Image: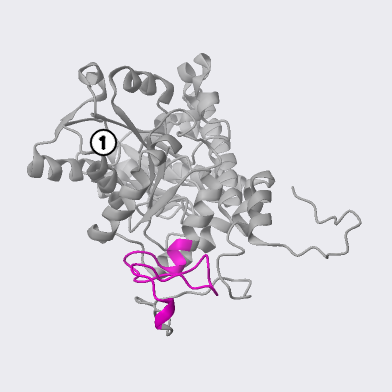
């Protein structure tokens, strides 16, 4: 951290944007989330304002007009022309994101908009992908219709060549299990392919796919980054080498014409959400490790309530082979994502359990402060009807365990 000592000089210390910028890397993640944008707005309000404006006035002095610019000397970090290009709230949101992720970050209207923008940027002839979010596969189908993009499985990765896209979601939806990014990076590097990662289910501070060699990383910011189930958002994080090659510039230029920008309200909500990202994600991570370990142990006793109702639990924290090999601890040093799945012993059990829970809400999506339990057959076609997906919030762990236990007991009581 910097110092404000004048060392005998008479000039008093005044904090500047440059001084704060130099000090920020030395602050903890949670401190950065509060102060990374302190100098963005010229206004002295502590809480950021919401700016719905679409267009911004040029200078009234014709001698100060510069073609294709609208830099305001009174707002050097917050100058804009038109909100499809940049806007105050999304700009401020990106300033904080860049500090927290440690890399250049571009925001979008949704996670699918972020994936679509990556796909347009890379423009591969082949994409290698297995499982993951169904919406991503929908975009690939559209691209196939437009330009013949071929979709292959990650099991076919030996067929990858220069410029092809290897897309890895980790942790994986809906199982919550991790994939070895170091393995996929070596495969991509060997043939000149592009490695893109969907890291939605493990945001900072849990993992850093860029550090592991990913070229581009996307998040559906609707989930953990938003964290309150009240905003749509997507982001793309760019490897520094790719920034040097112009990828960030291209993403921003193409966002301008695609029009898939965040709205002003969403940008404002995103700023609010990032303030508590560390607190929320770390609490959710503690909760999931506690409840998954409890369920996993319960499965060992076939006569227990868990053993009589549940057949399987999946999550990265109990991914034994990956933990034994050691790569998982290196990939996710900050903890595990808060999404996991369980399989019930019957379709009726899976269908009825969510309605017996007090705390867990029966709804789609994930990553919010509230815990969710979804019978996946409700929102994902061809899903196993025995599967329930859980997203843990920030409630008390013992309350969550007690709620799930009483729900399972209620199933057995009905079945007796």
**Residue 332 percent across, percent down from the top left:** 52, 31
Residue topped by disc 1: 384
Q: Which SS does the magenta portion mostly show?
A: loop
Q: Is residue 298 left or right of residue 184?
A: right
Question: Is label 1 in a helix, a strand or a loop?
Answer: loop
Say above or below: 360 vs 205: below
For the rendered model, the colour scheme is one colour
**Residue 325 percent across, percent down from the top left:** 50, 14
Query: Going 39% across and 79% down the picture, which residue do you hit?
Result: 58
Q: Is residue 227 visible?
A: no
Question: Which one is in front, 344 or 140?
Answer: 140
Q: Is residue 136 magenta?
A: no
Q: What quarter of the picture does the C terminus occupy?
A: top left
Judged from this view, the residue extending furthest toward the bottom is 60
Question: Which one is in front, 171 or 61?
Answer: 61
Which stretch is magenta? Answer: 62-91
Say above or below: 383 vs 233: above
Q: Is residue 27 left or right of residue 278?
A: right
Query: Going 40% across and 33% down the picture, which residue do you hit?
Result: 170
Q: Is residue 243 left or right of residue 130?
A: right
Question: Which one is in front, 378 or 175?
Answer: 175
Q: Is residue 319 left or right of residue 38?
A: left
Question: Which one is in front, 27 or 338?
Answer: 27
Q: Is residue 66 magenta?
A: yes
């Amino acid at each position: 951290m910097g110092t404000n000592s004048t060392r005998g000089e008479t000039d008093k210390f005044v904090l500047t944007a440059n001084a704060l910028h130099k000090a920020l890397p030395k602050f903890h993640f949670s401190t950065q989330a509060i102060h990374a944008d302190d100098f963005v707005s010229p206004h002295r309000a502590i809480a950021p304002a919401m700016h719905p404006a679409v267009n911004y006035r040029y200078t009234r002095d014709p001698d100060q007009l510069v073609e294709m610019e609208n830099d305001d000397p009174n707002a050097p970090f917050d100058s804009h022309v038109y909100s499809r290009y940049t806007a105050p709230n999304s700009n401020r949101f990106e300033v904080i994101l860049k500090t927290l992720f440690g890399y250049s970050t571009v925001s979008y209207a949704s996670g699918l908009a972020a994936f679509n923008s990556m796909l347009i940027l890379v423009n591969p002839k082949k994409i290698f992908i297995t499982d993951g979010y169904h919406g991503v596969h929908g975009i690939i189908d559209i691209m196939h219709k437009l330009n013949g993009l071929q979709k292959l499985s990650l099991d076919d990765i030996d067929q990858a060549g220069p410029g092809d896209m290897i897309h890895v979601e980790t942790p994986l939806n809906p199982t919550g299990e991790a994939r070895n990014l170091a393995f996929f990076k070596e495969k991509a590097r060997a043939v000149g392919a592009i490695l893109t990662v969907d890291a939605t289910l493990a945001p900072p501070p849990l993992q850093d796919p860029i550090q592991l060699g990913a070229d581009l990383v996307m998040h559906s910011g609707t989930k953990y980054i938003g964290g309150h189930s009240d905003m749509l958002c997507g982001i793309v994080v760019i490897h520094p080498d790719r920034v040097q090659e112009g990828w960030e510039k291209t993403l921003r230029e193409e966002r301008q014409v695609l029009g898939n920008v965040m709205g002003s309200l969403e940008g404002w909500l995103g700023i609010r959400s990032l303030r508590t990202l560390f607190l929320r994600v770390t609490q959710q991570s503690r909760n999931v490790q506690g409840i998954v370990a409890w369920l996993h142990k319960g499965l060992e006793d076939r006569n227990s309530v868990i053993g009589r109702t549940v057949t399987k639990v999946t999550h990265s924290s109990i991914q034994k082979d990956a933990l034994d090999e050691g790569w998982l601890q290196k990939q996710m040093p900050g903890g595990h994502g808060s999404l996991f799945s369980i399989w019930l012993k019957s379709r009726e059990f899976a269908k009825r359990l969510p309605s017996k829970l007090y705390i867990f809400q029966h709804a789609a999506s994930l990553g919010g402060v509230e815990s969710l339990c979804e019978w996946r057959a409700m929102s994902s076609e061809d899903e196993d009807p025995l599967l329930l997906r859980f997203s843990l919030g920030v409630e008390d762990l013992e309350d969550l365990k007690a709620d799930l236990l009483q729900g399972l007991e209620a199933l057995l009581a009905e079945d007796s």
